Image: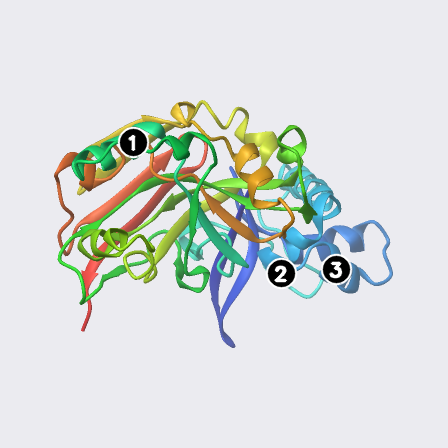
Amino acid sequence: MKLCTFEVATHLGKHQRLGAVTPEGIVDLNFAGVWNFLNQGETRPRELASVVLPDNMLEFLQGGKKSLSYAAETLESVQEKLESEKILRGAGGETLIYLPGQVRLLAPLPNPLSLRDFYAFEDHVKRGFEKRGELMPQEWYEIPVYYKGAHHNVIGTDQDVVWPAFTKRFDYELELAIVIGKQGRNIKAERAAEYIAGFTVMNDFSARDIQRKEMKVRLGPAKGKDWATAIGPVLVTLDEIGDPYNLRMTACVNGELWSEGSSGSIYWRFEQMIEFLSQDDTVYPGDLIGSGTVGGGCGLELDRWVQPGDLLELEIEKIGILRNRVIKGN
């Protein structure tokens, strides 16, 4: 499944809803679940849907495999019904499916519980140390390192990102990310895939001049990263992504290809990251984990720099395009 969070305008204002992107359109999973449960003869379909198919991504992820199973069953029923009917309405007249232009996609998980971003692509790490005139540290090969980001500053596709007033060196970073879908502790890498709800594209925006100063004092990054991180356009489940370590990754700036790489070049895999994170600690549904930048996947490595007004389009095979325009703040 390709899960999403979308915003729809109503006479009562704008509402955020949990959806699934299908060839027919974007299905409102909560309302479609009510409709499907009613057709199955459930006496309290709304109450049941609110538990197993809630209207927001975080609660849906907390429902685990049961919620995923109900979502798949609901989508199958909707698609079967669409073979004979063009428009579907819920019992109370609710819209069950939208065309893409009728709604706005937001970050698939607008409110992650945490954000940890790793440093998992060897080519990117090596180039960074070379540019600083330093040797690659042996410790990087011993543990998968990460920093903690500002999980409350997550934006989605087609949303503007503001150029921070404190930087002169704005950069994009092309990353693959996962969202945790199951609570666990002391998880072995061999079982860690069970804890992955899905995959998305991440743009780890960076203020390189501030980041450089932070790293010189051996702390951070913090301010160099914290103002915004973009994810999207959708969250793709394991069954649909196939092999997550065989995906083409690209970044275009104003339509020009700047970066191209593969998720297969990753050194530390997500399963190893989860094992490391969960050592005597707990991971929760809704935790967001980034891979770090693919080799060649940022302006710093290329000596090319983003400017105000630039359109950034990061694409990963089987997931889609994460699109953000850089704007100057007031």
Q: Is residue 41 above or below residue 178?
A: below
Task: Quadrant for the N terminus, please.
Answer: top right
Instruction: Give the image location of residue 291, x and y in percent.
Output: 43, 39
The quarter holding residue 265 reads top left
- Does residue 256 appear anywhere in the picture? no
Q: Is residue 11 left or right of residue 300?
A: right
Residue at mark 3: 51
Q: Residues within 10 Å of mark 2 (few under 14, many from 20)?
A: many
The quarter holding residue 103 reads bottom left
Foreground: 23 or 304? 304
Task: Quadrant for the C terminus, please.
Answer: bottom left
Query: Which tag, 1 or 2, sits closer to the chain's start?
Result: 2
Disc 2 residue type (three-letter): Asp
Q: CA distance from mark 3 to mark 1?
A: 49 Å
Helix, strand or loop at disc 1?
A: loop
**Disc nearest the viewer among 1 and 2:** 1
Disc 1 residue type (three-letter): Met
Q: CA distance from mark 1 to mark 2?
A: 46 Å
**Disc nearest the viewer among 3 and 1:** 1
Residue at mark 2: 55
Helix, strand or loop at disc 3?
A: helix
Answer yes or no: do the residues labelled 2 and 3 have beta carbons within 8 Å? no
Q: Residues within 10 Å of mark 3 (few under 14, many from 20)?
A: some
Residue at mark 1: 136
